[in-house]
Structures are given as structure tokens and as C-alpha cells.
């Protein structure tokens, strides 16, 4: 399973996780996707496929806070993480290891094989002989984290513990069923009524299970096992946040040609009252 390690910044907090909404702080977050890493290392998927489907990363100074108020009374809370103001956010596997996830990358292919990547500053990262480059088949990886879609990246996430409903089927599981990008039950995005291309845009959240751990710099701050460096927090669902506007078609981006109008003036977002 994918897993994440959170390291809360030291100071007056004594490395405590946020306790209530508004008790936000900074964290370093390591995310590891072992299955995808192995598929990439064994040559069973291309780097293009890897970076478009939840690649491993390391980030520093990420904003983390309790998400909503419904989980504040539980032993484990829901959390929101925002990477927009993170000090660093880099890939940790594949040919882009060490490169920033906030750059835009252009993947050129030749006969379906990745050959060269160019970032936003037009710096060439050679992966194979440049003579193999076929500029007619170019793919763009917009800077940010791509959960399950090469076209749309996001930088806000909800980590949902589902403490009162641990199967995950009532929320994220049902949303995944409705919004599956390969075999969707609902195939049309509302902005298509405006004559815009809704390819890759979602009408539901998306997420999957992630094992989550809390790392302590001072091991005596660990309330569960004093003297032990890591504390297992729980099996969370890593979800698209409902304010991840890029994924739902609410944000205008220069690299996303399907959004060529100010959709915030004409789009609506609905949330079920009794979900």
C-alpha cells in the first residue's frame, strides 16, 4: 500500500498533530507508492505513466490542519494538507528524482517510448539520444501532484480517517465508482454544455487508502510509545480536497486549454446535505 510519514515541526507544539480546526502548523511529508515504484524500476510502466499516477515525493513546510469539524471529537481526526507554500516538493523516484513537482514538464515520445523531458525554463533533461525526439507526440505534466490523471495536477488534499465508517465505501469508494475515468458511470462533465472540453475533469472526489505514520524528532514526544521514533496513526483515505478547483473545472490555468473562460462566474459546486 502507499504510505505517508508526517513530521510535525518542533517548537512549542512538542510535535503534536493539529488538534482542532484552526490549529494548523507546518509538516514535512514523505509519500511512498511502493507498487508504482517497483513497476517503474522493473520497466513495466513508462515514466510518463508513473508521474501521472501518484508518484513518490518528499516535501517540507507543508501546511496541515484539521479538516472540518466532524472529526474533532474522535481519537483520530481528518486533516487537510496544502502544498502551495511548501518550501520544497520533489519527486523521489524515476528520472525526475530530485526535481521539483511544481515545474511543468513536457514528455516527448518516439514509438510510445519516453525520450526527453523539458521543464518550464526550457532546460533539457536527457533521458535518451535527443535524435529520437518526436515533437509531434508531446504530453504535458502540469506542476503539482497527479493522483490518477496525467493532465490535471492538484496541491490540496483531504486525509480522511473514516473513524466511524472504516470501510471507505460510503464516501470515497462510492465516489470512485461514479467517477472512474476509464469506465465512468457518469460520462459528461457539465462544462461540456458550454462547448468546452471536459476531458479528465471530475464530478466527484477521488481517493485511495494510505497508511499514515507520525515521525518524531524527539522520540520522547511520542505519546503512544515514548522513546520510539514512529507512531502509526491509521489507515486514511487520501482524497482530492473539495477545494481542489483544478480537478473539477473551476480554475483557469494557462497549461489547461480546456479552461478558456472564467468558470468561477458560471460554474456551480453542489454537496449532498446528508452524505
Image: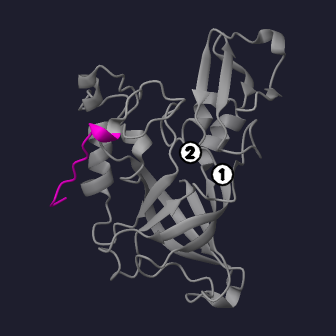
Relative side of 132 to 46, left or right: right
For marks 2 and 1, the one nearer the N-term is 1
C-alpha gap between disc 2 and disc 1:
9 Å
Q: Foreground: 185 or 211? A: 185
Judged from the image, the secondary structure of the residue bearing numbered disc 1 is strand
Badge 1: few (under 14), some or many (20 or more) residues near its Cα, within 10 Å?
Answer: many
- Above/below status of 266 relative to 269: above
Hey, which quadrant is residue 16 in on the image? bottom right
Q: Position of residue 100 (x, y in %)?
A: 71, 45
Relative side of 31 to 210, left or right: right
Q: Where is residue 66 in the image (x, y as percent from the top left)?
A: 43, 72
Q: Which of marks 2 and 1 is in front?
A: 2
> Residue at position x 54%, y 38% from top?
53
- Above/below status of 136 relative to 238: above
| Residue numbers of the magenta segment | 264-275
Q: Is residue 273 magenta?
A: yes
Q: Where is residue 176 in the image (x, y as percent from the top left)?
A: 33, 43
Relative side of 183 to 47, left or right: left
Q: Tell me which secondary structure the magenta stretch mostly adopts.
A: loop
Q: For the C terminus, give its image quadrant.
A: bottom left
Q: Where is residue 23 in the image (x, y as percent from the top left)?
A: 48, 79
- Above/below status of 252 relative to 155: above
| Residue 125 visible, this angle | yes
Q: Is residue 178 magenta?
A: no
Residue at the disc numbered 1: 57
Residue at the disc numbered 2: 145
Pointers 2 and 1 in contact (C-beta within 8 Å): yes
Relative side of 32 to 251, left or right: right
Amino acid at each position: 500500500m502507499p504510505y505517508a510519514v508526517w513530521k510535525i515541526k518542533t517548537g512549542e507544539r512538542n510535535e503534536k498533530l493539529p488538534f482542532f480546526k484552526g490549529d494548523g502548523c507546518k509538516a514535512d511529508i514523505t509519500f511512498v507508492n511502493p507498487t508504482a515504484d517497483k513497476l517503474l524500476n522493473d520497466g513495466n510502466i513508462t515514466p510518463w505513466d508513473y508521474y501521472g499516477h501518484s508518484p513518490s515525493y518528499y516535501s517540507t513546510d507543508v501546511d496541515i490542519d484539521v479538516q472540518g469539524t466532524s472529526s474533532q471529537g474522535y481519537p483520530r481526526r481528518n486533516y487537510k494538507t496544502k502544498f502551495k507554500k511548501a518550501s520544497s516538493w520533489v519527486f523521489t523516484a524515476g528520472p525526475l528524482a530530485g526535481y521539483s513537482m511544481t515545474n511543468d514538464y513536457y514528455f516527448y515520445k518516439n514509438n510510445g517510448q519516453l525520450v526527453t523531458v523539458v521543464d518550464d525554463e526550457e532546460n533539457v533533461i536527457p533521458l535518451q539520444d535527443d535524435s529520437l525526439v518526436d515533437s509531434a507526440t508531446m504530453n504535458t505534466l502540469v506542476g503539482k501532484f497527479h493522483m490518477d490523471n496525467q493532465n490535471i495536477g492538484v496541491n490540496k488534499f483531504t486525509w480522511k480517517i473514516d473513524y466511524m465508517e472504516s470501510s471507505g465505501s460510503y464516501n470515497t469508494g462510492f465516489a470512485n465508482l461514479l467517477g472512474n475515468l476509464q469506465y465512468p458511470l457518469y460520462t459528461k462533465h457539465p462544462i461540456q454544455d458550454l462547448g468546452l472540453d471536459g476531458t479528465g475533469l471530475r464530478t466527484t472526489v477521488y481517493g485511495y487508502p494510505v497508511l499514515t505514520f507520525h515521525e518524531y524528532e524527539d522520540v520522547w514526544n511520542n505519546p503512544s510509545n515514548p522513546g520510539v521514533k514512529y507512531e502509526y496513526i491509521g489507515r486514511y483515505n487520501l482524497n482530492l480536497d473539495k477545494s481542489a478547483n483544478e480537478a473539477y473545472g473551476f480554475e483557469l490555468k494557462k497549461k489547461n486549454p480546456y479552461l478558456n473562460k472564467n468558470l468561477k462566474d458560471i460554474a456551480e459546486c453542489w454537496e449532498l446535505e446528508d452524505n
